[in-house]
Amino acid sequence: MLAVELLGPLRVSVAGRPVELPPGRQRVLMAVLAMSAGHTVPTDKLATAVWGTDPRGDPRANLRTTVKRVRRALGTVELITARSGGYLLATEPDKVDALRFGHLLDEAAAAPGPVAERSRLAEALALWRGTPFDGIRSDWLEHSVAPALQDRYLTALERRVDLDLAHGAQPDPVQLAKAAERHPLRESLWVRLLRVLESAGRPAEALERYETIRRRLAEELGADPSPELRQVHADLLAVGAPAAGRTVPRQLPATVNGFAGREAGLAALDELLGPPEKTKSRAPLLGPPEKTKSRSPLITVISGTAGIGKTTLAVHWAHRVAGRFPDGQLYVNLRGYDPSGKAVRPAAAIREFLDVLEVPPHRIPDGLDAQAGLYRSLLAGRRMLVLLDNARDADQIAPLLPGAPGCLVVVTSRDHLTGLVMTYGAHPLPLRLLPPDEARRLLAARLGQQRITAQPAAVEEIIRRCAGLPLALAIVAARAAIHPTHPLDALATELQDTLGALDRAADVRAIFSWSYESLGDEAAARLFRLVAGLHPGPDSTIAAAASLAGVPVTRVRAPLADLTRANLLTEHAPGRYSCHDLLRAYASELCQARDADRDAARRRIVDHYVLTAYAAQRLLGGDMEGDIETIDPAAPGPGVCVTALAGRDATMAWFATERPALLAALELAADLGLDRQVCYLARALFVFLHGQGFWHDRAETQQAAVAAARRLGDPVEESRAYRNLAFALADLGRFDDAHRNLDAALEQAHDDPAGQAWTHYHRDIVYALQGREADALDAARRAHDLFEQLGHQAGRAIALTDLGFHHGRLGNHAQALELCEQALILHQKLGNRPHEAHTWSCLADTRLQLGDPAGAVPCYHQALELFREFGDPYAEASTLAHLGACHYLAGDHLAAHEHWRHTHTLLGDHDLSATDQIHTQLAIIDKSTADAFRRRR
C-alpha cells in the first residue's frame, strides 16, 4: 500500500518501505497526484503543476518520462496508472495525510458533541509536521493548494483552542505561538494566544504579545487591533486592575510649610489647567476650551536652575488641584541630577507605578516597551495627576507619559526639555529668581511678619545676599529660626562678612558653606558630610547614620537635630533624613576633601544593611534552602549598627521602607568589591521581593549575586545564586532562561551533592509553575534520591512532600497519600513546622481530589492553624478557600460561602493574582466549585 505525507517535507513509502524521490519534478508529480488520490488528474493540469504555464518542449512527452521515473522509484507501474486524458495514483485517500486531514475536519464539523469534535480535531492537527509541500517547488501547489490547507489548519487550531478553554483544558501555547509568528497579521490567532497565556497563568507574557501585534499592525497596515483583540486586551487589564474600593494612589510629597510667592507661576499653571469642570463627566477640562479636543495628555515642564524651587512649586500646586483628579496622583523623584550620577531608569519608575496601581507581579510584562504599554493602558480613561520630579532629559520622561487625554503630567527639570515640548506639545514654564517682594513674603512665612517688619533694612540685605534663590533663603531663614532672639541685622552682617551677593544663583555653595561652617560642632559637621555625601539611598535612618559615623545611635540624635534645624537635612518622616541634590553634591565634595576614612564608612553602611536584612529574613523565614543551609555573615564590625526588629509586621515594614536603600546598598557593595556582601544581601532580599511582587528587582539582585559569586570563585555560592535567579526568572514566565540557569547551577555543583539536590528541587518548582507535572515529579524524585544518599533528612522531607503533591496532581492518589504521610512524620520529627503546614495542605488536597471532603477537612484545619502561627496570610486564605470547597462539594453552600467570605477579606490587601491562583487550584478539583468561589468575590 502506498502512503504519501505532504504536510511537511515529502515522505513516500510502499508497504512500509521508504521511497526517496529526488528533488524536482518527480516530487511535484507525486504531490499533485496524491492530492487527487483515487481520481484521474488531467494531463494538462499535471503539466501546468510540474512545468508551469510556459513549459519547454512537448509537455506530454516530458510528463511520460517523469511518470516512468517515479514508477521506477516506487518499484511498480501499478501505483501510477494511465487513464483516458490523464493519470491516477492508486491508493486510498486516507493514505495521503493532506486528504485524511480534510476528512477528519469534515468529521469534526459533523460530530455530535464537543468531546468527539475535539478528538477529531486533535487527530487532524497531529498530522501536521511543518509547512505543506516543504521542499517541493511548484507555483501551482504554492498558490492554489497550500493556502487553502493552511487556512483550514489555522481554523482547526483555533477551534480546538476554543473547545479546550471552554471545557477547562489547558492548550499548549507553544504550538499557538509558533502559528501566530508564522501568520503575524491573523488577529484571530493572537486572540487565542492571549487567552491561552492568560489561562496558563502567564498574563504578563500575554500583555507583551499584545504590544507586539499592536505595533506590527500599526507599522505594516497602519491599523489598530480588531475589536475582538482589543477586548481580550481589556479583559487582561480588567483582571489585573484594582477592584472597586481599592486604595486610590495619593503619592504627592508633603507640601512645604511657609510657601510664599510664585504668583505668576501659579497663575500660569491654573490657566493651563482651565477652570474647574461644571459637570460630572469623566473627561476633565484640561486647558482652555480651544485645547479640549486634544488626544494627548496635558504636559507642563517647570524648568530652572538648581535650588530655584521647581519641586516646591510643583508639589504645592499639585496639592491645590489634586481634587480634580479623583483617580489619584502618582509621584516619582527621577534623581536626574543625583551626585552619584545614577538617575532612576524609566523601567524602574514604571514598575513602581505599576505596583502602586496594584498590578499583580505576574501580570507585569518583561521589557520597557511592554511595561510602558501596560502603564498607558491602565491610565487610559482615568483622571490622574502624574508628577515626574527632577528629570534629566526627554528620553527619561517619554516612557512615563500617559497615552490618552484625561491625565495631567507635571515635569520638573533643570533642563528646558525642548524635545518634550517639540514632540509631545509640553507647555514650558521656566522659573526665574524670586523678586524682592516674593522673597520678603517667603522670609515672613518662615520667621513671622513681626520680625520681618521690625528690621526692614536687614531683611533687604539678606534678600540681596541670597539673590532671590529660594533654597538659599530657606537655609538663611532656618539659621534665623534657630536663634529667634538674635537680631536679623547681626545675621545680615555675618552674611556680608562671609560672602558677597550670589552671582545669579551660580554660587549657592557659598550659602551652604556659611551654614555648614556655622554649625559649631564637628560631630554634626562630620555627620552631614557622611549622611548627605555617602549614603547610597534616597534617605537615611538614625541607625544608618550611626553606622556611617561609626558611633552608637545615642551619639547621632543630637547632631541630626542640629542639622535639621540648620536646614542642611530634612526630617521628611519620623526618623528619616534627606536633603536637596545640591546639598548632597556639596557634602560629597566636602567628604572627598576631609574624610580619609570614607571607604570605611561606606563599608559600614553596607554591613548595616546586609546584617539587618539578613536578621530580618531569618525572622521572616520562607527561604527553604536558606532556612536549612545557613552560613551567617560575620558578626557586626566596630561601628556597625544593626537595627533590631520585633515581629513579622515590623520586619515587613522595614523591608518595604528600606527597599530603595537596600538595592542601592547592594550596588554600592558591588562597586566596592564586597562580593560576599552582595551574595548575602541578594539572598536576604529574595523572599521579601518575591512576596511583595518586586519580581524584576529580585531577578536583578540575583544576577548581581551570580556575578559576585563568579568573582569570588566560589562554586557553592555561584550554584546557589544560579538557582535563585532561575526561580526569579520562572516567576516572570521566562522558563527557558530559568532552565538555562539551573543547568549552570548543576554544572557549578558537580562536586557538591547537596547543591545538586537543591538544584533538582528548584527545577521541580519551575516545572510545576509551567504545569509540567510529570517533569516536576521526575525532578522531585532526583532531589529526594540525592537527599536520601546524603542523609539530609530535612531536604528529603521537603522533596517527599513535593513527590506526594505531584503524584496527586497526576491522579496517583494512593501514592500521594503515602508519600505525604511519610513527609509529615519527618517534618514533625525535625520540628520543621512551616513545611509541616504545607504537607498537611497537600494531604488535604489529595483527599479532596479523591472525593473525600470529610477526610480533607481535618487536614486543612491542621494546616490552617500552622499558617496562622507563622503569619502567612496567602496560605491562610488559600486553606480557607479549600475548606469552603469541602463544604460546597458536601452540599453545605452556606458554610462554603462563609469560608469564602473570610478568604476574600484576607485577600483584600493582596493583588488579584492571589485570587486567580486559588481559583486555578480549585478548578483542578472541581471547576464548578472554583467558579462559585470566584463569584463570591
Image (cartoon, rainbow, N blue to C red):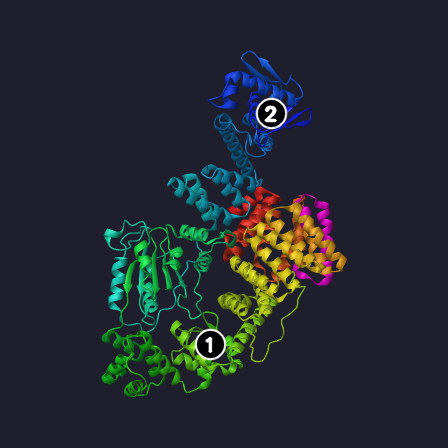
Q: Which residue is mark 1?
A: 531
Which image quarter holds the N terminus?
Answer: top right
**CA distance separating discs 1 and 2:** 79 Å
Main SS, magenta region, reads: helix
861 or 690, which is in the foreground? 690
Query: Which of the numbered marks, if any, corresponds to residue 659?
Result: none
853 or 823, which is in the foreground? 823
Magenta residues span 805-834
Q: Tell me which amino acid carries mark 1.
A: Val
- The residue depicted at 59 percent of the width and 55 percent of the height is 726
53 in the magenta segment: no
807 in the magenta segment: yes
Q: Earlier in the sequence, mark 1 or mark 2?
A: 2
Rendering coords of residue 645 (x, y %): 56, 71
Q: Is residue 590 visible?
A: yes
Q: Nearer the viewer, mark 1 or mark 2?
A: 2
Q: What is the crowding at mark 2: few (fewer than 14 residues within 10 Å), some, or many (at least 20)?
A: many
Compared across the picture, whether 777 is left or right of 47 comes to right
Compared across the picture, whether 12 is left or right of 140 comes to right
Q: Tell me which amino acid carries mark 2.
A: Val
Q: What is the crowding at mark 1: few (fewer than 14 residues within 10 Å), some, or many (at least 20)?
A: many
